[in-house]
Amino acid sequence: MGLFDKAAQKSPWIIHFDCNSCNGCDIEILACLTPLYDVERFGVINVGNPKHADILIVSGAVNQKNQRVLKNIYNEIPEPKAVIAIGACGCTGGIFRECYNVMGGIDTVIPVDVYVPGCSPKPEAIIDGVVKALGKLEEKRKKMKEKGEENPFLPEEFTSELVEIPSLTSETKEPVSVSHNPEEPK
Amino acid sequence: MINSEQVPRSTVPFGPQHPVLPEPIHIKLILEDEKIVEAIPAIGYVHRGLEKLTEKKDMYKSIFILERICGICSFMHALCYCQGLENLMEIDVPERAKYLRVIWGELHRTHSHLLWLGLFADAFGFESLFYECWKIREKILDIMEATSGARVIISTNTIGGTRRDINSDMLEHIKKTTYEIEEALAYIDKVFFDDNTVLVRTKGVGVLSKKDAYLLGAVGPTGRGSGLPQDLRTTNYAAYGDLDFEPIYETDGDCYARCKVRIRELYQSQKLLRQAIDQMPEGEYAVKVTQKPEGEVVSRVEQPRGECMYYIRGNGTDILERVRVRTPTFANIPALVHMLPGHQLCDLPVLVLSIDPCISCTER
């Protein structure tokens, strides 16, 4: 990895969506941000806008009403992105899988990269999940590069074609006359 | 110039995914300029159908299902359900189990109120205060992990007592921790009570009069902040009859009063914990249950957010016919919708959080 690639690596920004959970996992995700675990020292920031995020953390199972919201949030996150399913119910449906309004785990609606089991998982496990997701993100970024898709985080290279700026002098036959005299009547 | 009556109205959606509230609730806000004139809540994003699920499982498995109604006050849900069934089947619960329930219950109340204080501080943008509150909360979670093996959903209740005991060394440790928490609280309550930044955002915001609170059926700290001295712990369930305490209430009815009630309750919880540890008798902590539930019963406990009611009907078998849950946030949403109109949009996070909403409880 060159120096430029290393410098262009980004700290992961996460977005959290509570899909159908009992709050147990949500408060553990928030606990990761607090002084005891403090993931911000690694540059992990919890953001509210999906367009700023790299990693989507979802807790809880999917139901009929929130699957549309989950898909929307997933589609709004720019590529490359990773999804982490938190908790037993996020992975498979868990204790809620027999409920009439529950469709199953997160992977019934969107592709999931990392599963964090437990009811509820400890903050250490969640941080481990985020670290694993970082590896996945890096793989995806490499694949995008091989395919030739532009990495949105890298600046455009200088070999790209220069855009021609239309010049006034060569093509316009009559140069536009601009008067600098304020006293001249219009 | 536009006449004030002709201000165009705009609609702003709040949620279901929103940085302020980790839980999904959708509130459709109708604004005139920056002023809220109407708030229409829409729920259903966390509905799972847990009441129906309890009709498929036997009554012991239902404890674990009902604990997952809400991860923050999971112990209280199990407590309410178990006490209801114990009353129905006329089981004599050992005295030690009753005290253990008080201890875990008050630990849960402490962690829930500290969690709320942090989120409330975050709602008006005071992030360092949020961190301070959650730093204190970790002490409680360490105790939970040491006594039950889990940090959040501890599953220590069962019908006829508790599933675990707490030994005397651990009780001493809990007692020591209560003093540490009081010390740490004295440091942060000055900020909540006297800091100008906090006062500007909370004092006089979202006033709910005593009459309105009563008519709208507000429960818990929302009602107590408006001067309703209503605390179900005074009905002497578990071992609360042997302990000395008074319901805490404030009369102002604004966000500041609701915050003050919760901070004072934190101190009260520490005192209750120490009393319970001092008076705790030795002996068994669970009895064997051989009866089957038949008939119906209503059970109520005081959760951190207010009154929680369970209606249970059994038909003489292991599988219950019906479990109906009425949670405190469900009772407080009418009060919230009543409070919102007339406030600025920027006050909305503070107002929504001041009732301590638990959407997961409400929708089940």
Image (cartoon, rainbow, N blue to C red):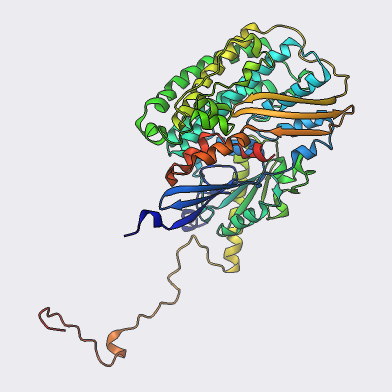
The residue under the point 29% across, 89% down is A170
The residue under the point 41% across, 33% down is B204
Residue B192 placed where, x, y %? 42, 27
Q: Nearer the viewer, residue A33 or A42?
A: A33
Q: Is residue A105 above or below residue B71?
A: below
Number of on-image labels: 0
Relative to residue A18, is residue B161 drawn left or right? right
Relative to residue A5, is residue A98 drawn left or right? right
Q: Is residue B159 above or below residue A172?
A: above
Q: Is residue B283 above or below residue B63?
A: above
The residue under the point 51% across, 52% down is A49
- Residue B88 appears in view: yes
The residue under the point 44% across, 41% down is B347
Quadrant of the frame with the N terminus of chain B: bottom left
Relative to residue B316, is residue B278 drawn left or right? left
Residue A147 placed where, x, y %? 60, 68
Q: Quadrant of residue B252?
A: top left
Q: Is residue A23 above or below residue B113?
A: below
Q: Nearer the viewer, residue B141 or A130?
A: B141
Quadrant of the frame with the C terminus of chain B: top right
Q: Quadrant of residue B155?
A: top right
Relative to residue B280, is residue B122 drawn left or right? left
Residue B32 placed where, x, y %? 43, 52
Residue B54 placed where, x, y %? 80, 35
Q: Nearer the viewer, residue B187 or B332?
A: B332
Hey, which residue is sitting farthest bottom in the picture?
A173
Q: Quadrant of residue B239?
A: top right
- Residue A34 appears in view: no
